[in-house]
Image: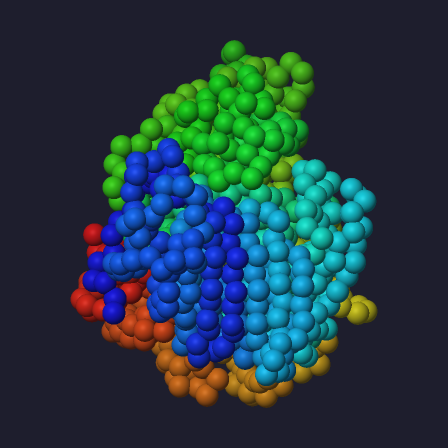
């Protein structure tokens, strides 16, 4: 039975727990139908809190007995709590025995089975689905875990920490005992039991300690773990070198599982990964997959310090660990990429992701601060805001205090808080205290508005040159739009990394010292900065490297943007200038309601990029890719997804045809010879070749040419790696070429036994550019495909998130069929896996900005879902916020 409405939890209501649990001994008798759990806890009253009953969390459990100091004790159960009214005042031993049913656990939270093995997922509140506990991150305990299971079915038995004992039992069963010396919150607990194999590597770190690294997967997947292992080793080396943070465990284990709600999980010493974030081979994974695996392996490893050694006091502080750890994995990926240009490519990709996902969130129904003020279901707050905007906030600290200053701040943070559960304020204070007198420290209270104010700040910049005084004055204004529950916003502290260029693109000195780049710190609604000795009107290059998560209106003319695009020393701003030129044209056409026509000047500038002798192929590919439809939508007050799609398609086909010969030359010039490696240089070449091929096939559709579709099909058949193969397939499918159907069929036949590749097959079809409703019809039909299931999150997302969240023109239909489909699927998934359902539910976050007839129909669909009485609290919170 589900509760109708879940209570709202408020950040300011935080109170320490009435009891602490210092030690836990857990014994699992593992059985898919009924697992028996015995928990022996060492409990003490928290003297700092008023005397009260012991209230333990528990969900979907059967309690068998409760003992205090060996004698049975009376208890009551209320909702999801087990309450002991007369708990002793002195320290006591609490023993609870209960059962749960892993094989029926389709929510994938708590203890569940997947592919015949057992796995756990405890963040945020899954531990309470295993046994009764104070399941909150500020209760930290030392765990000893005994696992007992059938030896033939479950030869591998894993939990956190070190293996201290193992052996045989009667009836073909065996056992293993694990002890984790580090006190940890329950959300970092993990168990794995199954028939798995491991890639192993022994390493000796800088500190001279030996460690065993293991990556566990199903039999047959071992060859696909090499990249993950290499990524893990690189992460260990990097964290020691960059932040002085060593691996603190003798054994570090990583496990892959096919059924998983998220990317991966940082359980202490036993990270559990969605196989999509772990397994890669050249034949089955793309360059993007390789890069994603590297960054997620690093992310989970980095949590060992930022999250595990220092954890969150409560879930409102989630960005304390997630924002910081995303920042760390982004820095790692940039350092791994190497060259300045490859670093810029990483940065551009991260910003593109932020703008595509976080910006819409920040202006929609689910807008919330990086540190939210309230929630009803915490799983709904693992968001782009908490993760990616949170990471931008951490990046701003580094920009304000410098790289060395930031490292000093991190050091102080660990000196003060190692072993504790703390808050975002504690982090801010440590960085500030390590940098007295810095631009951060003198504005700390104002800077912390980044944690409390939702919404993307709008910054306007206008320059004025005074020829007589030889000065250039830059005036900035800022405001943050209202968001649900927050109407009045105060100015944010915004670091603007900038430079000035002359009309020919040369960098100008900004001060007497001759610096050509500086950081302006905005902290008022309206303020100006004056540069001296400026002879002629310069071109300002503002917000270099995207130094703050804001929307900037600098009012630059196309001529000025062209100067930046050709000459800026900052590669991010060179890319940005090109995107702005494209965006300006698309927006002008949309606002005028006229068909889009690219100007010859724009086309020539794109040709210049494509043929440029020095630019990296990876950078060219990003510069030649038009802004995404969701980012374009964000620039408009009223969104017509069909009009946006038509404009983007028009721009694309004009670029395809105007640069036809140059695309062909680029395709030929960027073939990678030799064996596959996912390094930035080769993946950049493949990316540009794939873009060129897709342009050529697209153009062939209009000209009737059959050569390029034929070449694409040949390349698809002969490809020696997945990047080239799926690139050629996408070129055919996206252009709706006649050869798309046979290619799709062949692809499925080749890879039908590889679930991660079949996911690509579904996603590719559901993400294809819509034309005449064909893509929607096909996606809908694919829900009936034998390989489709709502039970596997990767598979469900590959079709449904692709269609409803990443293909606006296929989803938003005048006949509302997309919305009807969405409602059906959300309700069907909700009965299986509420977390997954609520992610898909978020496709409707931005219904209120849609043009008619979409707006009314979308609202009706949301209201129909909200009217269902037995929704999960997860989906209920999303649809109710959407309607509020
Ligand atoms: N904490 C995980 C991460 O960011 C994400 C996660 C959250 C995984 C909740 C599972 C459940 O690395
Ligand atoms: Zn994380």
Q: Is residue 442 left or right of residue 17?
A: right
The x and y percentages for residue 281 are 69, 71
Q: Is residue 11 above or below residue 294?
A: above
The x and y percentages for residue 836 are 40, 66
Q: Is residue 175 left or right of residue 377?
A: right
Rendered image quadrant of residue 58: bottom left
Residue depicted at 36% across the width and 41% down the height: 89
Q: Is residue 504 above or below residue 464?
A: below
Relative depth, front residue between 61 and 609: 61
Residue depicted at 60% across the width and 31% down the height: 415
Q: Is residue 214 left or right of residue 206?
A: left
Residue depicted at 57% across the width and 64% down the height: 146
Q: Is residue 750 above or below residue 632?
A: below
The x and y percentages for residue 635 are 37, 48
Task: Tell me how the rendering is colored.
Answer: rainbow
The x and y percentages for residue 247 are 69, 47
Total numbered circles: 0
Residue depicted at 51% across the width and 12% down the height: 468
Observer able to see residue 526: yes
Observer able to see residue 358: no
Q: Residue furthest front?
A: 71
Q: Is residue 179 above or below residue 61?
A: above
Relative depth, front residue between 655 and 50: 50
Work out which quarter of the rendered image holds the N terminus and state it.
Answer: bottom left
Relative depth, front residue between 206 and 66: 66
Relative depth, front residue between 280 and 354: 280
């Amino acid at each position: 039975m589900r509760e109708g409405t879940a209570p709202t939890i408020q950040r300011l209501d935080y109170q320490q727990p009435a009891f602490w649990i210092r030690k836990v001994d857990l014994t699992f008798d593992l059985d898919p139908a009924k697992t028996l759990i015995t928990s022996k806890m060492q409990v003490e009253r928290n003297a700092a809190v008023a005397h009260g009953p012991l209230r333990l969390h528990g969900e979907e459990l059967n309690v068998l007995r409760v003992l205090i100091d060996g004698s049975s004790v009376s208890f009551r159960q209320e909702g999801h709590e087990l309450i002991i009214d007369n708990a002793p005042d002195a320290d006591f031993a609490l023993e609870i025995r209960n059962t749960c049913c892993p094989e029926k656990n389709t929510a994938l939270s708590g203890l569940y089975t997947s592919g015949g093995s057992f796995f756990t997922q405890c963040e945020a509140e899954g531990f309470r689905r295993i046994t009764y506990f104070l399941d909150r991150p500020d209760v930290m305990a030392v765990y000893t875990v005994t696992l007992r299971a059938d030896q033939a079915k479950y030869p591998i038995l894993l939990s956190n920490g070190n293996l201290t004992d193992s052996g045989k039992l009667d009836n073909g069963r065996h056992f293993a005992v694990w002890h984790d010396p580090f006190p940890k919150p329950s959300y970092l607990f993990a168990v794995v039991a199954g028939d798995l194999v491991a890639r192993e590597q022994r390493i000796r770190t800088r500190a001279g300690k030996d460690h065993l690294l293991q990556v566990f997967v199903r039999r047959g997947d071992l060859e696909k773990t090499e990249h993950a292992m290499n990524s893990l080793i690189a992460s260990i080396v990097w964290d020691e070198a960059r932040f002085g943070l060593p691996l603190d465990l003798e054994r570090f284990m990583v496990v892959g599982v096919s059924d998983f709600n998220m990317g991966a999980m940082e359980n202490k010493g036993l990270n559990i990964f969605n196989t999509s974030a772990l397994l890669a081979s050249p034949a089955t994974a793309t360059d993007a997959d390789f890069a994603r695996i590297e960054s997620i392996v690093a992310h989970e490893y980095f949590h060992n310090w930022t999250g595990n050694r220092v954890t969150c006091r409560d879930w409102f502080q989630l960005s304390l660990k997630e924002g910081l750890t995303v920042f760390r994995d982004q820095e790692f990926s940039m350092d791994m990429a190497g060259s300045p240009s490859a670093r810029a490519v990483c940065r551009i990709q991260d910003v593109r992701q932020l703008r595509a996902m976080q910006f819409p969130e920040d202006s929609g129904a689910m807008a919330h601060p990086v540190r939210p003020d309230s929630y009803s279901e915490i799983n709904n707050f693992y968001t782009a805001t908490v993760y990616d905007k949170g990471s931008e906030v951490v990046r701003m600290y580094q920009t304000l205090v410098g790289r060395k200053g930031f490292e000093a701040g991190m050091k102080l943070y660990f000196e003060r808080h190692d072993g504790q559960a703390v808050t975002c304020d504690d982090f801010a204070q440590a960085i500030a205290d390590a940098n007295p007198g810095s631009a951060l420290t003198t504005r700390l209270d104002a800077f912390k508005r980044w944690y409390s104010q939702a919404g993307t700040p709008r910054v306007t910049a206008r320059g004025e040159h005074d020829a007589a005084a030889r000065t250039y004055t830059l005036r900035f204004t800022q405001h943050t739009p209202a968001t649900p529950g927050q109407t009045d916003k105060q100015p944010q502290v915004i670091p603007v990394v900038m430079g000035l260029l002359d009309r020919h693109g040369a960098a100008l000195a900004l001060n007497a010292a001759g610096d050509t780049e500086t950081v302006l710190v905005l902290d008022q609604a309206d303020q100006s900065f004056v540069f001296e000795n400026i002879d002629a009107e310069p071109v300002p290059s503002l917000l270099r490297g995207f130094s703050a998560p804001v929307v900037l209106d600098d009012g630059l003319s196309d001529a000025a943007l062209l100067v930046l695009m050709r000459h800026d020393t900052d590669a991010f701003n060179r890319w940005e200038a090109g995107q702005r030129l494209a965006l300006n044209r698309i927006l002008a056409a949309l606002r005028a309601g006229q068909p889009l026509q690219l100007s010859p000047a724009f086309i020539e500038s794109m040709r210049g990029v494509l043929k440029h002798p020095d630019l990296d192929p990876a950078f060219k590919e990003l510069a030649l890719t038009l802004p995404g439809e969701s980012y374009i939508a964000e620039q408009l007050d009223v969104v017509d997804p069909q009009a946006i799609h038509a404009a983007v398609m028009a721009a694309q086909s004009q670029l395809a045809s105007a640069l036809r010969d140059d695309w062909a030359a680029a395709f030929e010039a960027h073939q990678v010879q030799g064996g596959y490696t996912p390094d930035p240089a080769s993946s950049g070449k493949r990316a540009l070749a794939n873009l060129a091929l897709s342009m050529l096939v697209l153009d062939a559709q209009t000209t009737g040419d059959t050569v390029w579709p034929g070449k694409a099909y040949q390349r698809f058949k002969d490809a020696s790696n997945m990047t080239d193969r799926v690139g050629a397939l996408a070129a055919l499918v996206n252009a709706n070429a006649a050869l798309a159907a046979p290619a799709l069929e062949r692809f499925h036949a080749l890879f039908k036994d590889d679930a991660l590749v079949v996911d690509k097959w579904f996603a590719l079809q559901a993400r294809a550019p819509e034309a005449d409703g064909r893509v929607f019809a096909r996606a809908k039909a694919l829900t009936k495909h034998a390989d489709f299931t709502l039970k596997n999150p990767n598979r469900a997302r590959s079709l449904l998130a692709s269609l409803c969240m990443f293909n606006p023109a296929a989803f938003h239909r005048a006949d509302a069929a997309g919305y009807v489909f969405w409602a059906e699927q959300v309700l069907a998934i909700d009965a299986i896996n509420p977390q997954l359902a609520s992610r898909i539910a978020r496709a409707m976050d931005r219904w209120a900005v849609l043009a008619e007839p979409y707006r009314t129909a979308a609202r009706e669909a949301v209201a129909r879902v909200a009217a269902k009485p037995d929704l999960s609290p997860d989906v209920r919170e999303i649809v109710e916020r959407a309607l509020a």
